Amino acid sequence: MQGTALDYLPIVITFLVAAGFVGATMFVTHLLGPKRKSKIKNDSFECGIESQGNARLPFSIKYFLVAILFVLFDVEVIFMYPWAVNFKELGITGFIEMGLFVSFFMVGFYYIMKKGALKWE
């Protein structure tokens, strides 16, 4: 089954509405926002506490690892949504393919757990 350009019209309209909303919001807030500039207002703000020391201190790689793993498994869920919407149309073949997809991620998750990537000391 081959689609025509008209089949993509709702996607294009959604994109244009979203982009228009973002652009209009940014423009209106720029027009209506306060325009007072001063040295104190332009200084960096650290929750009311004076800055101390260097902000470039090294910290554990675990934070980056957890963030990357979160993104990885979050993307997996994003790919599951279209499958869930078309579950009946895909039939048993789609179910087997999604089972393989999830099993690959579960093997990766098992590897991560075995390596202790999520253990905090």
Image (cartoon, rainbow, N blue to C red):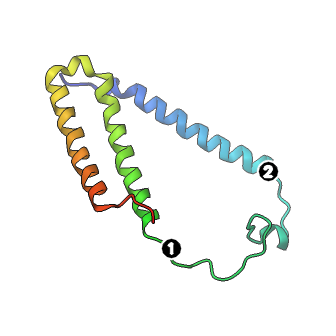
Number of numbered markers: 2
Which of the two discs, 2 and 1, labels the residue nearer the N terminus? 2
The residue that appears at 35% across and 28% down in the rendered structure is 8
Q: Residue furthest top?
A: 88
Quadrant occupied by the N terminus: top left
Residue 57's quadrant in the figure? bottom right
Left or right side of 17 for 41:
right
**Residue 40: horizontal and vertical position, in percent?**
84, 71
At x 24% / y 55%, what residue is drawn? 111
Question: Callout 1, which amino acid?
Answer: Phe
Q: Nearer the viewer, mark 2 or mark 1?
A: 1
Note whether 43 is above or below 92 in the view shown: below
| Side (left or right) of 41 relative to 108 | right
Q: Write down the residue under mark 2.
A: 33
Q: Position of residue 26 (x, y in %)?
A: 66, 47
The residue lying toward the viewer, choosing from 96 and 106, is 106
Picture layout, residue 44 above or below residue 12: below
Is 17 on the left-hand or right-hand side of 119?
A: right
Picture coordinates of residue 60, whole percent (x, y)? 46, 71
Residue position marked by numbered label 1 in the rendering: 59
Pinpoint residue 47: horizontal percent, then vertical percent: 76, 64
- SS of the residue under disc 2: loop
Identify the residue shown where x is 27% and y is 57%: 114
Amino acid at the residue labelled 2: Gly
Label 2 to label 1: alpha-carbon separation: 37 Å
Mark 1 Cα within 10 Å, few/some/many (few <14, many 20+)? few
In the rendered image, which quarter contains the C terminus? bottom left
Q: Quadrant of residue 68?
A: bottom left
Is 117 drawn above or below residue 30 in the view shown?
Answer: below
Which SS class for mark 1? loop
Residue furthest to the front: 121
